[in-house]
Image: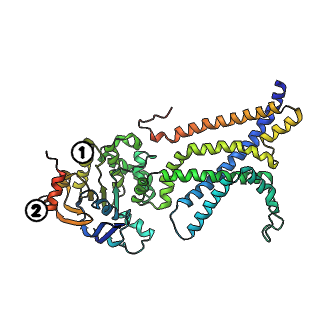
Amino acid sequence: MISVENLTKSFGDNVVLDHISTAFPAEETTVILGPSGSGKSTFLRSLNLLERPESGVLHLEDLTIDYAQPISSKTTLAARQVTEMVFQSFNLFPHLTVLKNIIEGPVHVLKTPKADAEKEARELLQQVGLADKADSYPAQLSGGQAQRVAIARSLAMHPRYILLDEPTSALDPELELEVLKVLLKIHDENQSMIIVTHNMSFAKQVANKILFLEHGKMRYDGPTAGFFNSDDARIQAFLASMTFTL
Amino acid sequence: MWKIITEALPQLIVAGLKYTIPIAVISFIIGLALALVVALTRISTKRGAFNILRWIAGFYVWLFRSTPLLVQLFIVYFGLPYLIIPGLAPTGIKLDPYTAGIITFSLNTGAYCAETVRAALLSVPEGQWEAAYAIGMNRSLVLRRIIIPQALRTALPPLSNSFIGLVKDTSLAASITIVEMFEVSQQIAAANYQPLLMYSLVALIYAVFCTVLSWLQKWLENKSSAYLQTTQGGAHS
């Protein structure tokens, strides 16, 4: 399980994470919601140390990281084995084929034999519906295909948790759908996920738990139904702002 | 006139292939390795001893870019024999002209290439670092597997520029007694009293060498940027 205690971070006077404490249950999907600039991405990125809060404690399975203390590079590497990150802008490695993007981590970090890694990579590509793209380069993929490759790349590392930072925000609705379908499938296989998204209907469908951040503060931490039926004025205002009405 | 040309041409080409090109190639390989080390040092964010290393790297780039190559050659070949270091070099540092030439050309081109490589490394998007860190790579693996391959492709055109410049700059080696192509043309001109013809001829050979090198650059660029094509198998043409 991943949990955090009192994560705090500020950029200058701007407090982006204000004593955030919560837990992310294993084998479940937690969705982080909130208006732009509420600290969602910073929060997510501090779970795999791409962002360093000034203070607070992060528990990753049996690893404990105290952000107030210096963190050794060995601890950083160990921490990143627990999670994988899927980025809004995919961040595939453009100089490597799709297959090589996927086996890069297993072969060079986990030291998996290349043949085994390739076999698994092809299975993962099958799973995300891109078996025929193994030898393509990222530049030859649509946004939706690129993000599905990125998801396969993260799955290849067998992380306990996959962190997704607005995985469909850069995509057209049609391409968004193909990515969401893949995520739903992974969710159904009990892969632990933590997703930052602006897609409310997807959040409603996939989330076991909702976290709502506003101005760096945790405004809601609980079950999905409770969030969407909340009588809290701020949450209602947020939900209203996310729904298109004329 | 044809007789003069056909007599001079083989001697010039032999000198070119035997000295000009090898001196340029060896110096460039050493210079490029040096450039990579210097660039990586300069972009590192490590503190402590690295502050001093970064300063040294910056000083080296400044020194070799701010002084003329010809002067650098003179200092290394004619000047260093007078540098007496008790214990280490009690009779001064005497280098044979080829060693002096290759050391100077390597250091000179290395300083220019270091800036090219540094800019190319910095041009790789931050997201590439993050994605590589996220799959658990350490910094050296990220550099080796993800950043450097992409940076070198970006750096290819300016690096080719430096290499082509170096090929022509090796003519300065004539001044430190290396019998490279330009020196051979001077010797022939002194003997047959045909300076215009001889120097035009040697200029033409430099032009041919450099043209072949630009073709090579173009081929390398196509090859190394194939992955950027949006359709499979296509290449810039």
- Name the residue type under label 2: Asp
Please give left or right for residue A82 compared with residue B162 in the image.
Answer: left
Image location (x, y in percent) of residue A17: 30, 67
Please give left or right for residue B92 compared with residue B115 in the image.
Answer: right
- Name the residue type under label 1: Leu
Image location (x, y in percent) of residue B198: 80, 33
In the image, residue A143 sits, relative to residue B137, either above or below, namely above
Q: Which residue is mark 2?
A: A231
Which residue is at the front of the view, A41 or A142? A41
Q: CA distance from mark 1 to mark 2?
A: 30 Å
The first of marks 1 and 2 along the sequence is 1
Asked whether the viewer can see residue A62, the reply is no
- Please give the chain letter of the residue carrying mark 1: A
Which of discs 1 and 2 lies nearer the camera? The answer is 2
Image location (x, y in percent) of residue B195: 83, 33
Q: Quadrant of residue B207?
A: top right
State the SS at label 1.
helix
Taking the view exactly as shown, the residue that stands out farthest to the right is B191
Image location (x, y in percent) of residue B49: 57, 70
Please give left or right for residue A137 compared with residue A225 in the image.
Answer: right
Report crowding for label 2: few under 14, some 14 to 19, many 20 or more residues within 10 A (C-alpha): few
- Please give the chain letter of the residue carrying mark 2: A
Q: Which residue is mark 1?
A: A177
